[in-house]
Amino acid sequence: MMRRFWQIVLVFGVLLTACTPKASQQQKVRIAVLPVIDALPIYVAQQEGYFKEQGVEVEIVPVLSAPERDQLMQSGQVDSILTEVVVNMIYNKETPQIKTVRFLRTTTVTTPMFRILASKDSGINTVADLAGVPIAISEGTVIEYMTDRVLEKAGMAPTDIAKVAVPKISDRMAFLDSGQVQAAVMPDPLASLSIKNGARVIIDDTSYPEVSHSVLAFRIETLNQQGEAVRKVLAGIEQAVTAINGDKTRWNGLLAELKLVPEPLLKDYVLPDYPLASVPSEEQFADAMQWAREKGLIQKDLQYADCVDASFLP
């Protein structure tokens, strides 16, 4: 009788083990990233073995545009995306789907993330000259949000702000440099290359640093099922941020390989200070939400706690 009991226990244990996902499967995280220097800490954490050291496998999935990134997220092909709070809100407008868990980059009063540039032959020299001129942007993102807030703060009436959607960063730069658009919002360092090619800076986001940022967001499903893996990812990124901020010249080879900084700028380009572990404040969230509602991107107020979660930070 006792022998029969232990046979049953053994069979049950084997079945339970077979039905339980392997630890290695649970620990793999797929992150979609845009070709921007905001992603550098993720690549450094991969290259330097920080993710491996933390005990998590990360697959970096490069994308060329926000729509491509969002398609991967919506189809379940990635667990996490480099994005911003406005996009987070759009995802969560009906029901919570993703949460921001960390800043990846922020604007400071001395280091811009985005610049509004005018093409060299446009004749545009001031903010006032931009009235009614279509500015090439990525629609429904932090770029459009920043454009509205920065120009309004500079005194431009909302009705005078005109925009045209050009989602791909490379296309915006090409159109600006060729004069196909008279003005465009560009992230650094591509903005610096456009300036080198003759574009003029009309205004940048250092005048309103609270509105510009990039973040890492995860599926809520991933946070619930692989919370420990997410913590390990963020711990690896924290190691990378510390390494980058401690020696900004060490990463030129990686920047060149990934084409995150154009080759003509590599020699003199100075990386920004990357933020240590932190998330957007409730005040930043509230302002972005107000803008998103005004634009019709969301139809109701969202809860901060449904969109931002600092509990996974190291």
Image (cartoon, rainbow, N blue to C red):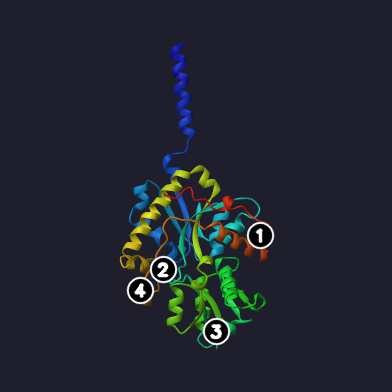
The label nearer to you, 4 versus 1, is 1
**Given the image, on which type of amino acid does mark 4 rest?**
Leu
**Given the image, on which type of amino acid does mark 2 rest?**
Leu
The residue that disc 4 covers is 266
**Given the image, on which type of amino acid does mark 3 rest?**
Thr
The local secondary structure at tag 1 comes to loop
Q: Nearer the viewer, residue 245 or 137?
A: 245
Distance of label 2 from label 1 (alpha carbons): 32 Å
The residue that disc 1 covers is 298
**Label 1 crowding class (10 Å Cα cut-off): few <14, some 14-19, many 20+?**
many
Residue at the spot 43% in from the left edge and 77% down from the top edge: 192
Residue at the spot 35% in from the left edge and 62% down from the top edge: 244
Looking at the picture, how far across and down is residue 191, in whole percent? 46, 76
The residue that disc 2 covers is 260
Q: Which mark is residue 160?
A: none
Say if mark 3 contacts mark 2, CB within 8 Å: no
Looking at the picture, how far across and down is residue 181, in whole percent? 56, 81
Q: Earlier in the sequence, mark 3 or mark 2?
A: 3
The local secondary structure at tag 3 comes to loop
Q: Earlier in the sequence, mark 3 or mark 4?
A: 3
Q: Earlier in the sequence, mark 4 or mark 2?
A: 2
Q: Earlier in the sequence, mark 4 or mark 1?
A: 4
The local secondary structure at tag 2 comes to loop
Q: Earlier in the sequence, mark 2 or mark 1?
A: 2
**Given the image, on which type of amino acid does mark 1 rest?**
Ile
The residue that disc 3 covers is 126
Left or right: 223 in relation to 236: right
Question: Does residue 253 appear anywhere in the picture?
Answer: yes
Looking at the picture, how far across and down is residue 82, in whole percent? 49, 59
Residue 296 lies in quadrant: bottom right
The local secondary structure at tag 4 comes to loop
